[in-house]
């Protein structure tokens, strides 16, 4: 895997981002805004499992309404994150905080698209198991954010 990572880090795009004084922070702005939007949609939906916030909407309706925002923010976050990774590919690949973030990103994505929909389909009502799903979801996404924040310190 390391040869691929090294190759990515030496591509013209990666070198352009790495050697620019403003390009990395510019891309990071989009990455963080997308993370905030993604986090907002997840938290809004997960809090609804507890009967908090957006109580005027049924859970399935809310899940349907936030889905486009979730997908858009996820696409921007993944694209910008890949560009940021490319600019310091070898450094990131060996960074334990980055590895932690990627592990939890994979788990959070799997959970969000495989488990979450089962509890937000039409006819679903908030239940104890739904609350557990919401807690796990928030914990997984919090780990993604914390791992990302820790990258600069590890």
Image: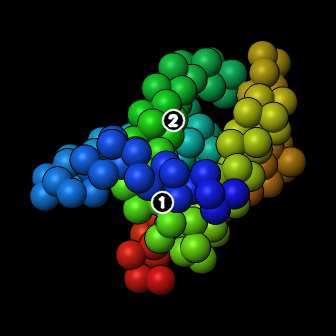
Q: Is 148 rendered above or below residue 57? A: below
- Where residue 90 sits in the image (x, y, percent)? 50, 66
Numbered disc in front, either 1 or 2: 1
- Where residue 136 sits in the image (x, y, percent)? 73, 57
Q: Is 45 rendered above or below residue 141? A: above
Say which residue appears at 84% left-offset and 30% top-offset: 118
Res. 17 in view: yes
- Give whichever of discs 1 and 2 has the lower sequence position: 2
- Where residue 56 sits in the image (x, y, percent)? 53, 25
Viewport quadrant of the N terminus: bottom right
Q: Secondary structure at mark 1?
A: helix
Rate crowding at label 1 as few (under 14), some (14 to 19) or many (20 or more) other CA atoms within 10 Å.
Answer: many
- For the residues marked 1 and 2, what is the alpha-carbon distance in whole angstroms? 21 Å
Number of numbered discs on residues: 2
Residues 19 and 98: in front is: 19
Residue to which mark 2 is pinned: 74
Q: Quadrant of residue 117?
A: top right
Is 69 placed left or right of 129 in the picture?
left
Res. 104 in view: no
Say which residue appears at 49% left-offset and 31% top-offset: 75
Residue to which mark 1 is pinned: 89
Rate crowding at label 2 as few (under 14), some (14 to 19) or many (20 or more) other CA atoms within 10 Å.
Answer: some
- Where residue 151 sits in the image (x, y, percent)? 45, 72
């Amino acid at each position: 895997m390391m040869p691929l990572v090294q190759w990515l880090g030496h591509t013209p795009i990666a070198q352009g981002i790495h050697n620019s004084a403003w390009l990395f922070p510019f891309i990071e702005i989009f990455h963080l805004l997308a993370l905030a939007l993604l986090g907002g949609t997840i938290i809004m939906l997960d809090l609804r499992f507890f009967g908090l916030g957006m109580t005027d909407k049924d859970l399935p309706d809310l899940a349907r309404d936030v889905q486009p925002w979730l997908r858009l923010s996820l696409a921007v976050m993944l694209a910008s994150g890949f560009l940021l990774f490319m600019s310091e590919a070898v450094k990131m690949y060996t960074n334990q905080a980055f590895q932690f973030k990627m592990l939890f990103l994979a788990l959070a994505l799997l959970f969000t698209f495989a488990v979450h929909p089962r509890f937000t389909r039409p006819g679903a009502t908030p239940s104890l198991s739904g609350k557990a799903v919401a807690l796990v979801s928030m914990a997984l996404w919090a780990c993604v954010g914390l791992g990302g924040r820790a990258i600069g310190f590890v």
